[in-house]
Image: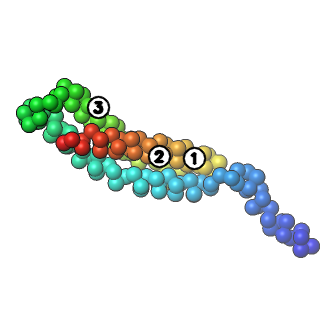
Amino acid sequence: MRKLLFAIAAFPAILSACNGGSGASADQLREEAIAIHDEIMPQVSSFDRNTVKIDSLLANLPELKAANPDLDTAQTRIELTALKGRLEEATDAMMEWMMAFEVDPQEKSADETKAYYEGEVEKVKRMKQLFEEVSKESAEKLAPF
């Protein structure tokens, strides 16, 4: 009888394990997405500062050329403009993700909610990758200035 009661009590856990137990719950996935967001969000302010710095550098290329005659201003303009675009792309991706993210998706089944958060985790992981790439690129390209 004891074994039967244990089996009945353990059934939901066994069923959960069989139905994707290797994956995280919807709550865990939501928390993972938010944690990744919280990790990379502070970089937005440095991206904004770098964008302002790039604008200043682009506006003052003649002065930079005078201070450094070897500076290829055409190439510098291309590189800084491209970097500014990447910084804005990363920042815009963060803002768009935050606006669209549903903390508590309404009118979704448990499976749909879990699938939604799995997708959100993947989105925010790609965004983290973008942030890491842009951060590294900024450090390299702005170091001489």
Query: In the figure, 34 relative to 83: above or below?
Result: below
Residue at the outermost bottom position? 2
From where the camera sits, is residue 137 visible?
Answer: yes
* Amino acid bearing label 3: Ala
Residue at the image point whose x is 41% and y is 56% from the top: 38
Residue 17 x, y percent position in the rendering = 74, 56
Mark 2, secondary structure of its residue: helix
Graded by Cα atoms within 10 Å as few (under 14), some (14 to 19) or many (20 or more), the crowding at tag 3 reads: few
The numbered mark at residue 118 is: 1
Q: Is residue 92 left or right of residue 30?
A: left
Relative depth, front residue between 18 and 64: 64
Q: Is residue 138 left or right of residue 128?
A: left
* Amino acid bearing label 1: Glu
* Amino acid bearing label 2: Val
Locate the C terminus by quadrant: top left
Graded by Cα atoms within 10 Å as few (under 14), some (14 to 19) or many (20 or more), the crowding at tag 1 reads: many
The numbered mark at residue 124 is: 2
**What residue is pinned by disc 3?**
82
Residue at the image point whose x is 43% and y is 46% from the top: 128
Between the C-alphas of marks 1 and 2, the distance is 10 Å
Between the C-alphas of marks 3 and 2, the distance is 23 Å
